[in-house]
Image (cartoon, helix red, strand yellow):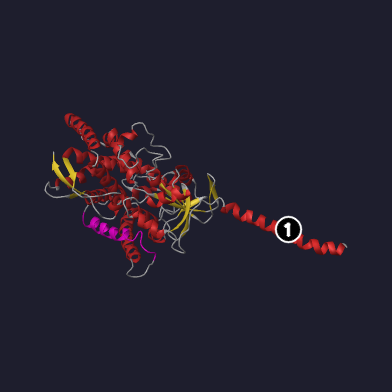
Amino acid sequence: MDTIWIVLMTPIFLCSLILCINKLSHKLKSKHRNQLPQGTLGWPFIGETIDFISCAYTDRPESFMNKRRAMYGKVFKSHIFGSPTIVSTDADVNKFILQSDAKVFVPSYPKSLMELMGESSILLINGTLQRRIHGLIGAFFKSQQLKVQITKDMQKYVQESMENWKEDQPIYIQDETKKIAFHVLVKALISLEPGEEMELLKKHFQEFISGLMSLPINLPGTKLYQSLQAKKKMVKLVRKNIQARRNKDIFEVPKDVVDVLLNDTSEKLTDDLIADNIIDMMIPGEDSVPVLMTLATKYLSECPDALQQLTEENIKIKKLKDEIGEPMCWSDYLSLPFTQKVITETLRMGNIINGVMRKALKDVEIKGYLIPQGWCVFANFRSVHLDEKNYECPYQFNPWRWQDKDMNCNNFTPFGGGQRLCPGLDLARLEASIFLHHLVTQFRWYAKEDTIVNFPTVRMKRRMPILLKRV
């Protein structure tokens, strides 16, 4: 009887045990899976990269985010640039990502970009060395001494450029601002003046940045190979500048970023590391700052009331300075309240920095979402800046919205944040302020008919032509 009972009950017991184990195993496996944000990983290998890039080159690059946010929520999973990725359009999640240290997230970029930047780039290094370099450069960029120099150089190069502008010919703002901003920034970095060497550096730099978003194939004839060769030539040029100073006495007051880094006693700041980072820091002079000035001009062209108020504000201070016989100084430009509101609104709408990518070093949970170890996370700023829940009529250029709005909120991160906050944010504002001041006090203009220019098309070389009339 006992034997029969055992024979009958054993299968039932084993089945029950297997069901319990399977249920427990399923719970353990699904513990994380259930916390993963909704979304899709797209096609094998390529994921959703093609759709992501396609949207990036339209008038609404945020459409990739908006479509998925409507289906899955503000945080969703995807697969872009070869990695499973958690995409965040949530301001709180973005803040957490930006403020986390290198024990949680490390920078992650497409392979071609990482290869071009190099292992010693401030964009990629972590820990003490990154904080040291960022702190040294940030302190120098905030110094009054550099702001005085930047102001003089901007005034000089802007005036020289504008003297050649003719009323009967279209002026391409982005081309003009690129020349100006590149000269100003390179002088602040390595004290190089306009001339043959500057033109050679600019030529190599154009070849270098053309491969930043290329296919990660480093073979002769490919874009990545050509970009790497151009960078080698730039490194050689910058190293020559650095080595010439190694033999000289250390200056108590550094005149540029090379001096700042050479004056530091850390043995980790080698000539190659300094040269690599000097080249990386040239990118804003070619890209970010010129785009900011170009878009500000575009938005003002489309908003006559804002243009009139900004013009009146700048003409007023110019007359005051002329009456007392003093030139405009850096603090004058930054003290113009409406000008700063225009720049702030341009940063919000233009989104010079679309977002940042990081890689999780361990499982991270935030607001009920899981970012698995080894996955990338893309903190998208543009979607936050253009979210109607954060900004009323987000696609309308409205500088007056900043009259009582706090810029230090989670919903406004045009320069990133945390330990990797862009150190040149104040200089970008200063350069844009100087350019706009000279533009509106010397010219009246209108955009050429049928010209459509926005953030992505500016970077796609569809430049913004304007027709001018001198005041």
- Residue 138, compared with residue 52, is above or below; it is above
The residue at the point 45 percent across, 62 percent down is 43
Q: Quadrant of the C terminus?
A: top left
The residue at which mark 1 appears reads as 16
Q: Residue furthest bottom?
A: 220
* Most foreground residue, 412 or 41: 41
The residue at the point 41 percent across, 53 percent down is 123
Q: Is residue 213 magenta?
A: yes
- Residue 199, compared with residue 139, is above or below; it is below
The image quarter containing residue 307 is top left
* Most foreground residue, 288 or 346: 346
Q: Is residue 231 visible?
A: yes
Q: Quadrant of the N terminus?
A: bottom right
Position of residue 2 measured from the top left corner of the image (x, y, whole percent): 87, 62
Give the magenta part as a residue range. 195-216
Q: Is residue 439 magenta?
A: no
Position of residue 305 measured from the top left corner of the image (x, y, whole percent): 23, 35
SS at mark 1 in the image: helix
* Most foreground residue, 369 or 223: 369
Position of residue 455 measured from the top left corner of the image (x, y, whole percent): 30, 49
Position of residue 302 measured from the top left corner of the image (x, y, whole percent): 24, 42
The image quarter containing residue 469 is top left
